[in-house]
């Protein structure tokens, strides 16, 4: 009888993580759910799987990827529960929408802590045991935002892109020890993260990027109608865990497959335009403020400056200053000057002037 394999899944209390934990549990895996709230997460998993509270194949550990102490404690707890895990699935993630000007730096820090820094720290703590065992697979869940930088989700897109680059680097380091890395690029799936409740928004629909937000929001809601079931993703994850390649990058969903294929074939400039048109964004320079119109004299001066040398322009400028009549002061200012010159000086003011000069 083969030994039961163990898998650690972060963010296993909902969405793709929950569907994956359920699928792998029913496939005979020993599932360790790494979640922020163990009580809430395990209740959802037991309801989904039908497992008993004392089932040794469904275990939970607390994990807050934004808290280094929590990550370190989770690694220790995983070792105590299952020893060296056969697989680690970095699935936990958050979503946020807003233009770069609209999103605070705190969001960027949280985004990178959740999608990169936390996963890196947890993997570092688990790697020594996996390396000594000479086996294991690390799966990174990416998305379209990790393939191309997507407008109004820049923080999410940057973090997912960084996650993929880390996976590529890691694969080259651990392959000689028998470990493999898989990146799964997901399309749109019917989970909470694509809904209003699952996305933190910083979008200002009345601000300078309001037109962007309205168009993208409309098209995003249309795309939700073709979202795939999370169970489909779980099946593909199960296949990925059986993979033998030292590094592989696979799409999950027809939309993700189309994006990966296009990104490989088409030049960068073409992909930029495709993304812009698909999201309904305005064209280049289409929203610039209108240019300031110059008068004939200003245009002639600019033309001369392009043709004549600097010393000649300086002489022309001095000549124009000499022949140009002085500009008379405004009528109100002239009246004030005249009235001031005629007003008598009070003795108190004269005394104050004397004291100043003293």
Image: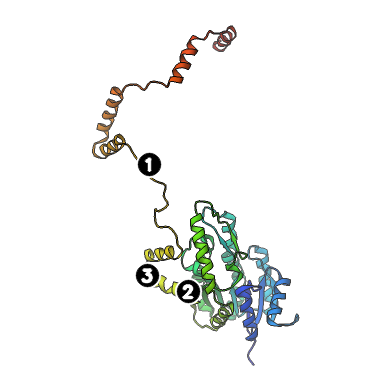
In the rendered image, residue 159, in percent from the top left (x then y), is placed at 53, 64
**Which of labels 3 and 1 is toward the front?**
1
Q: CA distance from mark 3 to mark 1?
A: 38 Å
Q: Is label 2 in a helix, a strand or a loop?
A: helix
Give the mark nearer the N terminus: 3 vs 1: 3
Count of marks overlaid on the render:
3
Please report the residue visible at 67 percent of the width from the left and 68 percent of the height from the top. Answer: 63
Look at the numbered discs 1 and 2 and tell me whether their residues touch, using CB distance below 8 Å.
no
- Residue furthest top as drawn: 347
In the rendered image, residue 212, in percent from the top left (x then y), is placed at 49, 58
Quadrant in the picture for the C terminus: top right
Please report the residue visible at 58 percent of the width from the left and 6 percent of the height from the top. Answer: 347
Question: Looking at this view, is 275 or 159 the one in front?
Answer: 275
Look at the numbered discs 3 and 2 and tell me whether their residues touch, using CB distance below 8 Å.
no
Please report the residue visible at 48 percent of the width from the left and 17 percent of the height from the top. Answer: 336
Determine if residue 123 is in view: yes
Determine if residue 163 is in view: no
Q: Is label 3 in a helix, a strand or a loop?
A: loop
The residue singled out by tag 3 in the image is 266
The residue singled out by tag 1 in the image is 292
The residue singled out by tag 2 in the image is 255
305, above or below 53, in the image = above
């Amino acid at each position: 009888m083969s030994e039961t394999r163990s898998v650690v899944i972060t963010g296993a209390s909902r969405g793709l993580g929950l569907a994956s934990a359920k699928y792998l549990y029913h496939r005979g895996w020993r599932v360790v759910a790494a979640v922020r709230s163990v009580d809430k997460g395990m209740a959802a998993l037991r309801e989904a799987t039908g497992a008993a509270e004392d089932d040794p194949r469904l275990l939970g550990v607390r994990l807050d990827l934004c808290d280094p102490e929590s990550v370190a404690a989770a690694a220790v707890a995983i070792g105590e529960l299952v020893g060296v895990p056969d697989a680690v699935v970095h699935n936990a993630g958050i979503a946020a929408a807003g233009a770069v000007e609209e999103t605070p730096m705190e969001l960027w820090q949280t985004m990178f802590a959740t999608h990169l820094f936390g996963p890196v720290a947890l993997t570092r703590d688990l790697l020594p045991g996996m390396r000594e065992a000479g086996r294991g697979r690390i799966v990174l869940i990416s998305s379209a935002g990790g393939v191309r930088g997507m407008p109004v989700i820049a923080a999410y897109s940057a973090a997912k892109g960084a996650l993929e680059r880390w996976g590529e680097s890691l694969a080259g380091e651990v392959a000689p020890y028998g470990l493999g890395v898989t990146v799964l690029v997901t399309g749109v799936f019917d989970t909470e993260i694509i809904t209003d409740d699952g996305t933190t928004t910083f979008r200002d629909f009345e601000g300078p990027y309001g037109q962007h937000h309205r168009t993208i929001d409309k098209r995003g809601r249309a795309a939700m109608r073709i979202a795939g079931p999370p169970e489909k993703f779980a099946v593909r994850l199960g296949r990925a865990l059986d993979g033998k390649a030292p590094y592989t990058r696979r799409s999950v969903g027809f939309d993700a497959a189309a994006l990966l294929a296009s990104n490989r074939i088409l030049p960068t400039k073409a992909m930029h335009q495709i993304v812009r048109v698909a999201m309904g964004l305005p064209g280049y320079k289409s929203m610039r403020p209108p240019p300031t119109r110059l008068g004939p004299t200003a245009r002639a001066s600019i033309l001369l400056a392009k043709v004549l040398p600097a010393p000649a322009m300086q002489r022309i400028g001095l000549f124009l200053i000499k022949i140009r009549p002085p500009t008379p002061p405004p009528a109100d200012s002239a009246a004030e000057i005249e009235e001031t010159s005629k007003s008598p000086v009070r003795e108190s003011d004269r005394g104050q002037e004397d004291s100043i000069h003293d």
